[in-house]
Amino acid sequence: MLPIRKTAKQGKRGILERLDAGEIVIGDGGFVFALEKRGYVKAGPWTPEATVEHPEAVRQLHREFLRAGSNVLQTFTFYASEDKLENRGNYVAEKISCQKVNEAACDIAREVANEGDALVAGGVSQTPSYLSCKDKSEVKAAFQKQLEVFMKKNVDFLIAEYFEHVEEAVWAVEVLKESGKPVAATMCIGPEGDMHGVPPGQCAVQLVKAGASIVGVNCHFDPETSIETVRLMKEGLQAAKLKAHLMCQPLAFHTPDCGKQGFIDLPEFPFGLEPRIATRWDIQKYARKAYDLGIRYIGGCCGFEPYHIRAIAEELGPERGFLPEASEKHGSWGDNLSMHTKPWVRARARKEYWENLKPASGRPYCPCMSKPDGWGVTKGAKELMQQKEATTEQQLKELFQKKKF
Amino acid sequence: MLPIRKTAKQGKRGILERLDAGEIVIGDGGFVFALEKRGYVKAGPWTPEATVEHPEAVRQLHREFLRAGSNVLQTFTFYASEDKLENRGNYVAEKISCQKVNEAACDIAREVANEGDALVAGGVSQTPSYLSCKDKSEVKAAFQKQLEVFMKKNVDFLIAEYFEHVEEAVWAVEVLKESGKPVAATMCIGPEGDMHGVPPGQCAVQLVKAGASIVGVNCHFDPETSIETVRLMKEGLQAAKLKAHLMCQPLAFHTPDCGKQGFIDLPEFPFGLEPRIATRWDIQKYARKAYDLGIRYIGGCCGFEPYHIRAIAEELGPERGFLPEASEKHGSWGDNLSMHTKPWVRARARKEYWENLKPASGRPYCPCMSKPDGWGVTKGAKELMQQKEATTEQQLKELFQKKKF
Amino acid sequence: MLPIRKTAKQGKRGILERLDAGEIVIGDGGFVFALEKRGYVKAGPWTPEATVEHPEAVRQLHREFLRAGSNVLQTFTFYASEDKLENRGNYVAEKISCQKVNEAACDIAREVANEGDALVAGGVSQTPSYLSCKDKSEVKAAFQKQLEVFMKKNVDFLIAEYFEHVEEAVWAVEVLKESGKPVAATMCIGPEGDMHGVPPGQCAVQLVKAGASIVGVNCHFDPETSIETVRLMKEGLQAAKLKAHLMCQPLAFHTPDCGKQGFIDLPEFPFGLEPRIATRWDIQKYARKAYDLGIRYIGGCCGFEPYHIRAIAEELGPERGFLPEASEKHGSWGDNLSMHTKPWVRARARKEYWENLKPASGRPYCPCMSKPDGWGVTKGAKELMQQKEATTEQQLKELFQKKKF
Amino acid sequence: MLPIRKTAKQGKRGILERLDAGEIVIGDGGFVFALEKRGYVKAGPWTPEATVEHPEAVRQLHREFLRAGSNVLQTFTFYASEDKLENRGNYVAEKISCQKVNEAACDIAREVANEGDALVAGGVSQTPSYLSCKDKSEVKAAFQKQLEVFMKKNVDFLIAEYFEHVEEAVWAVEVLKESGKPVAATMCIGPEGDMHGVPPGQCAVQLVKAGASIVGVNCHFDPETSIETVRLMKEGLQAAKLKAHLMCQPLAFHTPDCGKQGFIDLPEFPFGLEPRIATRWDIQKYARKAYDLGIRYIGGCCGFEPYHIRAIAEELGPERGFLPEASEKHGSWGDNLSMHTKPWVRARARKEYWENLKPASGRPYCPCMSKPDGWGVTKGAKELMQQKEATTEQQLKELFQKKKF
């Protein structure tokens, strides 16, 4: 039985020190989906004003990930760029300034990180400005603004994440790199590559050349697909004789039917994804596969709840030598079920049971796979333009007509 | 657009005043499953020592349900009887007294209830003692012990919930009734009735005769099945010319394949239930059906997250005249998706889309339905006996052999 | 290894002699579905004019069932009553007389029966006249007309099959009984009983009292459901202290989702039923269960192809002491696969492989279950009235509107 | 309404005359699967000795395809090479000479072809000799032997079909080409190419260079996958500036989950494929897609029953100007259902109903997709060696162990 440790007590060692030493770094899970279900984030805009409005809820989620084994707490600054906070009728920026949202996010993450010994990572993500074809300097200025907060609050390192176009990701890395802090960069792409058709291997090469020390993918695809994408990135880096640490933060949803645009394109996005949620055992298999491929920064994105992160920490417990605090409330591969009242549930207290289970959906009138919408619009398309005002009735009507139900 | 209200500002009106006036009372969701995923409850024993160990986590979950629209906060005292806290190697009672767990639960619930204007309900549930064939007085003593705490902490009313045998439920109601506070009683049974074969209609009659003012079901079955069971209870009461308020707190898991023992009997219980999780739209349909049948106490049990409770409050918004606080972050039937960056997701901002969606499981190698284990053991069976010690290796081995994989 | 025999060489022993002696009698499969796929029967009217138009095709199908093990060849006279041959634009009766169709059917069946040693059974089925509320004498006259042919052609016994209303089935039995030949009667009902709500047990009692020596079910439901219905019939007869042989001729389609009206009510009927087709192993399991319940006349209906009948004969080979001729081309439980070129297919040459296989549908965009149409119209409804003329455009339009897609 | 014609009355026009004139040529369906279900072919060896043993059954199946619209009747000579007739305990060659089987096949095909006006095609397929690494001359000698019969019986043209290795297919084409008759060549490969990794485009090029006038695929994959493979062949030919007619004869089973080895590799092969059977509507969609890609020789392979071939002829009726004889018993897109007794079935007499139906499997305990066996053995592997003797118990045991259930 492995000992339980709050988090790796590694003093103030930085992200690169840990990775360079061959250690496993466990990321956290996605905040927007988790907090949407808890009632603090609005699906649609997906913006993080909860850091100001309900800090206790954000704090609690950070704490749960920390307990579950996360070594990194990402500031809840997803989509917290000025242009996104006031996009399409989401008038957050009118009430709360972009700066306040970002600062509060940093403060909360640091507070909880200090409860254990986790690192704080400041994150930037893709901008409506880029999709609206604003020029390089304007897009970079948006990142710069967020970076200023991260520097003021002295985060431990930086992540450029959730980019669909490598061009924009490179711009983000360039901005972040100037800070002197280590930079990680992840794209939300699958094996087919970015929205302009740049294959994963080439994306990785461009990101490393721009200054990223850690590259990989996050969001948009399930663990299996994401690992395949990272494999292609690894191949690309090897071919280019470049070195970087590999990182993977996939969805906790099964998406075998996704096209290039990922789960956003599935008919179930975002309010009918429940049947796709990964079990803890799916995540243990993911952690093992990721580890075997040489990925050492292993976390999650949308759909990851604290118990999914714990599953990573438990699967890699033997390699790390300890279990996370939340494992006090969880037995490896279900062994606490030996305490269950019902004898047939006690009989499930073993790895081979859960490893082989093919869980039923309980939905006999539903199919197994969906056809993605496949609209195929990307940067520059009229419908992707940033607009402050709410989508009008007329605009919605046009969309409904375009979409055959 | 309906106004948003923190909770029904109804002064200090009690549960029966509200129900007698024809108001809808919204319950909360299940704590053990939600807190297990957050890392604070151990699946297997399912006991609530987190009230002492991590009050902030329990408080936060209460708060989320309150925001989502719950009018009742149940004390997190599920399975908090002395005999359960020390069953099968779960040595909680050695470290934390049963009384402390129950008292802390009351304090937290009251604290959060006062943030809005919700009622606090103290809950008792079935005991290992009953299954171990202890006599009536011993079983009643266990309930009595919990009741003392509830009286001391002055909860607003009492719930006897999660009973598989009406005989034990009646004992619980008898104990609770002596307090003078209103008593609700729910059984975890389906249309086939209790474990001794007593049909739902008869169960309801016995519970009302024992003193329950509110009767219904909780846990073990999905919303559709649970409503059917309450329908049978209603018929039974009408035939017996008895009156009581109806209550329903089902699972948020689809269980069309359950046998008499409910979801505990499904192969996926408890760690492979993800594909069965209800969407918010499933829950809106449930709320409507429950309302149409005349059920006025409508809540949830295991699997219900805050967004599921909000779905009840939104569906019944027109009847209640207001929306819960958490609806600030949610548009009716997906209408906030009009703020989404991707145009095809904006095209989903309408009721007919979500109402008709048949969500795919994303699991093409898995079936839709499972065969329940169907061991068919109940009260008195050797394997159901309460024992303080952990299940031994030998006992487990016998179980594994009995269970064909 | 059991010997192969063309058919049971039992001289000219009649159906009751065989059943009274406790022998297993194997029926044949459904002709309308098999010949529709071969190009000789029109789905919709489902009438048997192929006996005159293409006798070689009917003869070949009889021969295949004989080879597969059938002890009874039913004359292909399904729906060959005068009123059905000229219903709703199916102007068969104008070209070929009802009598000719029935006579040709008898001749072909007898010719093939003599190639082995099978019995010939003349069959009548429910009439449009009954649904159109014609009186008893008119309905009986239709049966009488078919019976005259059967007597002239001297069939070995008679079957009244495919009745949805026990009242009409009783009338048919009364007519057939006058011939002095043994009469079997099967209804196309499920456990819920006939279209007027008469439960299976009572149906069986009425049929036996009317003169049937053999009772059971055919068509409309899958093997599992059909066996359950026969079980209820058996119980009914036992309760009434009546004796009769039991018979079962179900669909070879899986229909767990059927309502009272059977597979006709499923959205897939009749041109999308392929994914529901039973495997030979499904049928072996059916044969065993039917035998274990005491059913001794075991056959099939729509969907049964010759290899399904062979599966019955192979499963019950040990009890009968021989295999059918077609087993020369089939190994028990797949053992001829040991001759396959591919080694991994040779590895499937064993019972446990096929017995446990859960066959995939190969249709990941389709559900597992369907909602039956559930129009709930029956005898007397306007839309069920017999009419000679084709359904008009106007009538079709009304139907399309009634049916929401 | 299109006129019905027995088959295209085109005098004695050859296959190339028709294709060169831009006409659609409809092939027939697979004989081994259809006759296995009828009781005349043994699954495992799959050899065609029924031509001698039961010519009436072979004749009837040819006739059904002719009625359904086939313009070509392939001699039932699949796997009728000497080495296959005596492989692994299938001692056919001891009783019936290879020559007799082939001659009888030609006679029957010709007899039925003359009933309409179809062409007769003599077919050869891959040999155990090739898999056993026999040299080119030995393999060619096997084809030569079959060709001699085809020349003696004067078939109209020749087909080399069901080849997994393009090398062997080229040898076959070379042999057949010497006859002076037109040669078609189809491989049983998917988009990944042949078993040695030669991509489809290159396979097509080699076959055309070897002398084939018509190239394409048959068997092993579903219609959708097969069309994709032919598309790749077409691209390959275009790139090489070669011209040939395109041909497609896929399975009538859905196989989205197949690997490179095709459906033989699926766990359901060959006795659990029922849920995968294509509906007639699936086949109409296939016919349309094939036509749109420029394929003009459109037929089927295993799983195709006469009604599937009729579906091709009906879909392409407008282009051809007539319907096949069997359409007398079938209405376009279900319109004969207007004659059905039940009103809700009459409401299905329209294209949009069947076109959009997603048929349920009726198998809620089964998955949608399977994992192929993926043994990955091919030419030269020990287990693929031809052997006259039956597979021994010891050999089977080794296979069972290798195969984890």
Image (cartoon, coloured by chain):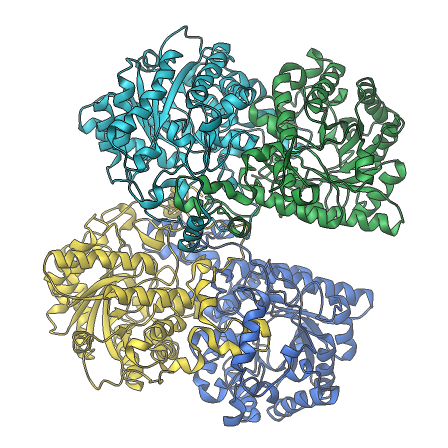
Chain colours: A blue, B yellow, C cyan, D green
Q: Position of residue A1 (x, y in %)?
A: 49, 60
**Rendered position, A262 above or below D294:** below
Give the answer, above or below, for where D313 lies relative to B249: above
Q: Position of residue D119 (x, y in %)?
A: 75, 28
Toward the viewer: C9 or B400? C9
Observer-nearest of A268 and A242: A268
Residue D17 position in % (x across, y down): 82, 35
Question: Percent position (x, y) of residue C160?
Answer: 33, 25
- Which residue is at the front of the view, A375 or D323? D323
Q: Can you tell which quarter of the image residue A172 is in?
A: bottom right
Is residue B324 visible from the viewing direction of this image?
Answer: yes
Is residue B79 visible in the rendered structure shown here?
no
Q: Is residue B301 above or below residue C128?
A: below
* Total numbered badges shown on the rendered structure: 0
Quadrant in the picture for residue D300: top right
Taking the image as shown, residue B48 lies to the left or right of residue B172, namely right
